Amino acid sequence: MRNPGKRPTRGWTLVETLITVAIVAVLAAIAIPVNKSIKARAHRNHAIGKLKTLGTALVSYTTDHNGRLPMEDAPGSDSWQAAADPENAEAWYNTLPELVGADALGKLANTPRRMYEDSYPLYLAGAPYPSSDKKLGQPYFAIAMNSRLQRKDEEGLKKAGTLTSIQDPHRTVAFLERGMPGDKKTNPGQRGFDAGPKANARAFAARYNGKGLLIFIDGHVEMYSVSDLINPAGTIKFPQTDVVWTPDPDEDPN
């Protein structure tokens, strides 16, 4: 006998199912860029903290060394062996980490994984380090020293730069976030994404929604886009007004 008090169960229609699927897809499409933006912001804040610490170490180094800057690189290849060579003790990646309580990079030659730990001052969480053990074969730098600061002497050897030679410390770049093989290029003029310890503006990496970070000689950090620094043809912007790469702002950095 039919029960008049019980209504038949109604299933979803095809139209209702399609509408629900569409709503879920829209919400997912909204959530993905939001999550990426949140992640980029976290990586940016992490990098700002690391670079500010490095900038403070640079100021301490120049104060302790009568205005002399650390060396930009070790002679020869960018290898663990070169970093560990006692002759390269004054390279920036050896001197500055020690000033913030970490080991010099050269001391990590036998334990290279330590370079890629969050606690190490040269590690940036937003940088695309190789996921495999390839990164253990040589140091991969997400930060590099400005290669336009050192000058060759009469014998053709590069000497460390000095504060007295830098005319505008507040606008002159000391370090930059440098491109690695896995970084995305946002300007056709970008090149030299080899993860080495020195670089110029062409190797600048924009990891945070099209922008990246620079450390200036006086230790402060600012954010720029690639187009602020270079032209699409790859020439560094000149005259140097807002950002300076050479000791003398009137010198062409290209």
Image (cartoon, helix red, strand yellow):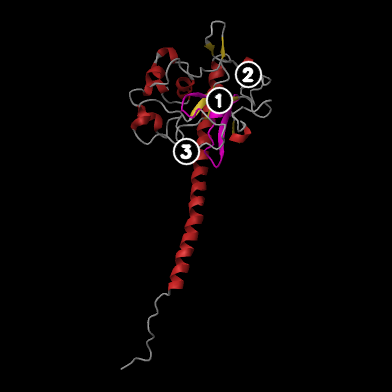
Q: Percent from the top left, x then y, of residue 126? A: 47, 38
Residue type highlighted by circle 2:
Pro
Tell me if I can see residue 252 in this picture.
Answer: yes
Name the residue at the top extreme: 155
Q: Which residues are magenta?
A: 192-218
**Labelled disc at residue 126:** 3
**Can you identify the residue that label 2 sits on?**
247
Residue type highlighted by circle 1:
Asn
Q: Percent from the top left, x then y, of residue 163? A: 61, 17
Whichever of callouts 1 and 3 sits on the residue coming sooner in the sequence is 3
Which residue is at a point 49% across and 47% down the rendered structure image?
Answer: 36
Based on the picture, tell me whether residue 193 belongs to the magenta stretch: yes
Q: Quadrant of residue 140?
A: top left
Q: Nearer the viewer, mark 1 or mark 2?
A: 1
Tell me if I can see residue 225 in this picture.
Answer: no
Q: How many residues crowd mark 3 within 10 Å: few (<14), some (14–19), many (20+)?
A: some
Residue in the foreground of this view, choosing between 160 and 252: 252
**Can you identify the residue that label 1 sits on?**
200
Q: Is residue 9 left or right of residue 238?
A: left
Q: Nearer the viewer, mark 1 or mark 3?
A: 1
Helix, strand or loop at label 2? It is: loop
Helix, strand or loop at label 1? It is: loop
Q: Percent from the top left, x then y, of residue 15? A: 46, 72
As drawn, 46 above or below 1:
above
Q: CA distance from mark 3 to mark 2?
A: 30 Å
